Image: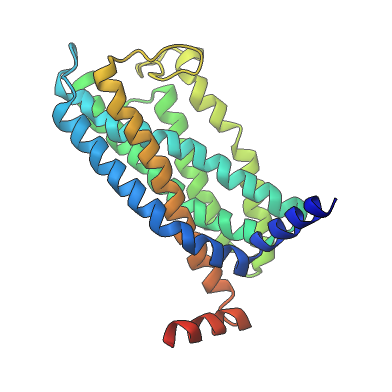
Amino acid sequence: MARSGAFWQRLHRWASPPGFYRLSGRWVPWLAAASLALLALGLVWGLLYAPPDARQGNSYRIIYLHVPASFLALAGYYVMAVAGAIHLIWRVKLADMLMSAAAPLGAALTFLALFSGSLWGKPTWGTYWVWDARITSMLVLLFLYLGVMALRQAYASRETAGRACAVLALVGTVNIPIIYKSVDWWYSLHQPATIRLTAAPSMHPDMFKPLLVMIVAFYLFYAWVLILNTRAEILSRERRAAWVRELAEEDVT
């Protein structure tokens, strides 16, 4: 019982803005170093050393940006929605800060996925854009991210804005399964998923290994930038708190 109580006490401390800020400061350098190293490795490996595709030639190499960005655009929306649910149910202040920090990062990754996909589409389909089920549902995802960002600015009350954003984020989760299954449910120009949990990847191992490195690198990069955004949000909201003033004094000395 004492051990369980200590765990919940520690968790409660980490879930507070000052506790998270101090703890996350230890993670930032490691996440930065690991993500940048893996990004460099994956890009060099995928763009320069992976073999060309038998049908698409070298144009397929855009997947080393497109696929990881798409993965994180979807996973990041779940992060935002879960944070919104925690804020709605338990009124955890840090969860609202995390949701606010996740929205612009998710929007940027979704835009990167759409932009890189259009570059891939030109040599593959002969056009930069088609109203394909997968592409259209990804565009809806971008609008959802932007909607959460705009909704936060639409209310004078931060608490009201947080609740409204959380509701929109939760409602928007219905779009995520549609994105995942769109190529299976409807006729689609977009190729089926390259990576499935229930089957071996459809790529040659020499192409798949650098892609796997890039996916891991993007997850680490997402965690790094999300923490940085959350720390900035904490300082913005808590700038008048005593612990922030103490932190500033420690930095000065």
The quadrant where residue 61 appears: top left
Image coordinates of residue 170 in percent, x first then y, are 65, 42
Q: Please report the residue visible at 23 percent of the width from the left and 32 percent of the height from the top.
A: 119
- In the rendered image, the quadrant that contains the C terminus is bottom left
The answer to which of 1 and 188 lies nearer the viewer is 1
**Residue that protrudes farthest toward the right in the picture:** 1
- How many labels sit on residues? 0
**Residue that protrudes farthest toward the front in the picture:** 2
The answer to which of 191 and 221 lies nearer the viewer is 221
Image coordinates of residue 51 in percent, x first then y, are 16, 20
In the figure, 7 relative to 118: above or below?
below
- Look at the image and tell me whether residue 65 can be seen: yes
The answer to which of 124 and 211 lies nearer the viewer is 211
The quadrant where residue 218 appears: top left
In the figure, 28 relative to 179: above or below?
below
Report whether 6 appears left or right of 147. Answer: right
Report whether 37 appears left or right of 47. Answer: right
In the figure, 148 relative to 182: above or below?
below
Q: Please report the residue visible at 43 percent of the width from the left and 41 percent of the height from the top.
A: 219
Q: Please report the residue visible at 41 percent of the width from the left and 12 percent of the height from the top.
A: 200
Image coordinates of residue 163 in percent, x first then y, are 69, 56
Which color scheme is applied? rainbow
- Look at the image and tell me whether residue 151 can be seen: no
Q: Please report the residue visible at 45 percent of the width from the left and 46 percent of the height from the top.
A: 106
Image coordinates of residue 100 in percent, x first then y, are 55, 57
Report whether 113 appears left or right of 150. Answer: left
